[in-house]
Amino acid sequence: MRLRNPSAPTLAPALAALILAAGIATSGIATAATTTTATAKADKTTTATKSTTGTTTTMTPAQKAMIAHVDANLAKLKKSIGITTAEESSWHGFTQVSRTNALNLATLYQQRSKTLSTMNAVQNMESYAAIAAKNADDMNALSAAFQTLYAKLTPAQQKKIDTVFRARAEAMTAKHLKKLKHS
């Protein structure tokens, strides 16, 4: 059995379960930044972003890349299910939680990477457990936002998104089962 690198992200940094299940992983970098402020060095590795509320938040290139990835996948999902003007508010809620979760997870992994080389095994496990717990909390928030969106969708849209989520979940399950088989 191969041991997994405990410092490597589990499902895809940031939106893990639901985002991966939907094939979303996910445009408002600035609006997400108003909810989650990342700590970063005061050098050229960070970018200041002005949010829609007028506050300025600093995001690292890694966080910007994470949000770009999340936004790209959310755009694909939005197009595939055909979000209408009437559904836009629920869609916005879902995307905001998606972006916030992505930034939360990226921040935790960045913090972990700064101390990983000096952690003992217990600290390593505690650090990883804290990330897993935050990810679970974030997934519960994302699930609630998604339920609100799903309730606003037409039956045809629900069928489309059910198909997208099911296909991705089946692919991920097959991938994990294949890994177990080779262990």
Image: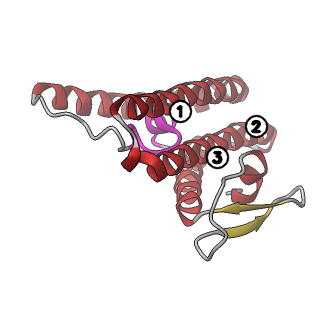
Up the image or down, 64 lies above or below 86; here it is below
- Label 2 crowd (10 A; few <14 / some 14-19 / many >=20): some
Say which residue appears at 74% left-offset and 59% top-offset: 30
Classify mark 3: residues with Cα within 10 Å, few (<14), some (14-19) or many (20+): many
Q: Would you identify the image quadrant in which residue 164 lies?
A: top left
- Label 1 vs 3, first from the N-terminus: 3
Task: Report helix, strand or loop for mark 3.
Answer: helix
In the rendered image, which residue does mark 2 sit on? Answer: 87
Q: Amino acid at mark 3?
A: Arg
CA–CA distance in space, label 1 to label 3? 19 Å
Q: Which residues are magenta?
A: 9-23
Where residue 22 sits in the image (x, y, percent)?
A: 48, 36
* CA distance for labels 2 and 1: 14 Å
Is 20 rendered above or below residue 99?
A: above
Q: Label 1: which residue?
A: 161
Dot 3 or dot 2, earlier in sequence = 2
Q: Nearer the viewer, residue 23 or 114?
A: 114
User: What is the three-letter code of the residue carrying label 2?
Assistant: Glu
- Residue 82 is tagged as none
Q: Are marks 2 and 1 in contact (CB under 8 Å)?
A: no
Under mark 1, the amino acid is Ile
Secondary-structure class at tag 2: helix
Which circle's residue, 2 or 1, is located before the other in the chain? Answer: 2
**Residue highlighted by disc 3:** 99
| Residue at position x 59%, y 55% in the image | 67
Residue positioned 32% across, 33% down in the render: 172
